[in-house]
Image (tube, rainbow, N blue to C red):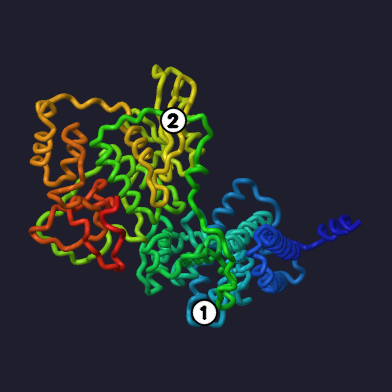
Amino acid sequence: MMIQQFVTFWHGCPPGLKEAYSSFAVQSFVALAYSLNRYIGHAPSRQGIQKFVPWAILNLTGTFVVHLLCLKLLSPDYGRSISVTGFPSLKRFLFEVLGSLLVFEVLFYYIHRLMHTRLFYKPVHLMHHRMTDKVCLGAFYVHPVEFLMVGFGGFMGTIALTRTHFPTMLFLGVVAELAGLYFHELGEVAGVMNHESHHVQGRKNFGSIGLMDVLHGTFMKTSELSASLEQSIDLVWEDMSDFVDPFGDRRGSLFDSVWTFDLDKDLLYLRKSDQYCLVSLELARKRLLTLDDFELLNSPRQLSVEEQSLPGPYWEPKLDLAPREKSFIGKILRDFGFTWRHILRRPMNTTTFLQLAYATMWISTLDFIIVERMGFEHVTTRGPYVDVVDLPSWETPKATLVKAGSCWFALAQETLEGLEMVQSHMTSQLEGSTTDVRTYAILTLRCIILCQVQGSKLIWTRSEALFDDDSTSDTAIDMIIWATNTTSAEQQPNAISSLPVEIQDKVLYCATTSFIASAKLGCELGLGSPLSWVDGGLQIMLQGVKRHRTESSPVESQIHFGRIMSGLSYKPERNDRILPVSRFLVGKLGRG
């Protein structure tokens, strides 16, 4: 009965009233449905939605009343509407959508810029800019005058100028309102147009799609938002690819707290040496926070070697290593783990993990450059080669399955993920393969596991600790060196290799400028004796800090990946040297 009455009423309703009623109903329904969906599915938005419901009702009702008044002026009996009655053809519909998009961009841009003039900004537009809640109904938290000028004047002006049909008007109204609700909660589209950047930098991004901003030079990409924040806040800023936790060794005593603002999740994390907690940023906007407001969390941690182990039975390969490789590469790998221990002890993102994983393989295969510091050098900026908040900066490939020698390395932070990579690659290589035995290594950095394909069967070793806190097992070092050199071609005999090893050592020493360079060359050529890490009675030690040099200072050998220093530097010095405890002390020299 009610439906029949509504149909009868609608058929007798003049075009003007149909337009006003439909526009009001569609806007109200979209706002209600969208906000209700966010209210149910996103708990942090609930309080903000409740706060802005009155403003949505006020502005939607005000627009409806003004719409009726305009139609009354146009035709006292509401016989005329602003939109064109009837249904457009598909071609006409597409033309109206595109034309309305462009016309609305022009009107919205200039009305919005008008809102930023002295006449309108403080009494009208400032209200919207003071809003800090990122919720959908924030789109309605504007002064009624502004809502009428933009929501009614801009939109209905577009409909009138483009002679848009009634159904197209309703479609555009839905799209425009959904865009407004979305922008005020999530802020951006595809990383290009960012509404939040307008709230941060009020002289940018006035338009709806950015076209007029490009023409007027007021367009700001999402990537420029960070730079705008840095310019407006007087602090020293540095771009970081990952989070660093400074707590875990003596260097962490220099820090009291680490604060992490997660703007995507609207959360604030607080980390101290003995606790890890969080609080909602929404609460911080309302009042000053106290420690009682924070919720305690368990600190994120790496999986232990035992947790990373695969089930037995286990393969036990015979790891025959040349003493010179084991002495030289093994020491460097241990020092590398010690130098970057502040990162290795915590979970890390993929970029940082690949940087450290590739560096481990490069060291194992001697794929690095030695840069020597010689003679006099006055250091203008002293400090640690690697500080507790530093991240690796060398570039690496993106591949996570890498071949070194004849061994394939699966780079993954969890062994099960690495095992899946190995099994997938093994299956793809079985068909048409003439090799019955194939070797793999699963490298998680915390541990290493060797795998071998024997026919169609995959076997593996126990998980051995590589960079596990401050300990590195000898077996793990042997495994990674063995894996990277498992089928290396034997060095070709030459005139030097037939000489006594003492003479080989002399030749290598004369051909290079330091014992480190001699040891690397010896490993590459298969010459000389293992490096004893002693030079003229002085211990060759890992250098944590860059210091001044005199003409008589021993050569200091730095290990570089391309043009980027690895953080490892070696120099002969007395083992009993006492260093003052200072901010620049990275670690105890002579470790290893």
The residue positioned farthest toward the right in the image shown: 1
Q: Is residue 131 visible?
A: no
Residue type indicated by callout 1: Tyr
Residue type indicated by callout 2: Cys
Q: CA distance from mark 1 to mark 2?
A: 68 Å
User: In the image, 527: left or right of 262?
Assistant: left
Q: Is residue 541 above or below residue 253?
A: above
Where residue 154 sits, quadrant-wise, is bottom right
Q: Residue at x 25, y 25 (%)?
A: 489
Quarter of the image with the N terminus in it: bottom right
Q: Position of residue 77 (x, y in %)?
A: 77, 69
Where residue 59 sits, quadrant-wise, is bottom right
Q: Position of residue 164 (x, y in %)?
A: 62, 57
Secondary structure type for disc 2:
strand
Q: Is residue 240 above or below residue 424?
A: below
User: In the image, 567: left or right of 353?
Assistant: left
| Circle 2 crowding by C-alpha within 10 Å: few under 14, some 14–19, many from 20 | many
User: In the image, 285: left or right of 504?
Assistant: right
User: In the image, 58: left or right of 10?
Assistant: left
Q: Which residue is mark 1?
A: 121
Q: Residue at x 25, y 46 (%)?
A: 562
Taking depth in this image into account, of 45 and 580 the one nearest to the observer is 580
Q: Residue at x 46, y 25 (%)?
A: 428
First in sequence: mark 1 vs mark 2: 1
Number of numbered labels in the structure image: 2
Q: Nearer the viewer, mark 1 or mark 2?
A: 2
Taking depth in this image into account, of 171 and 464 the one nearest to the observer is 464
Q: Which residue is mark 2?
A: 451
Secondary structure type for disc 1:
helix
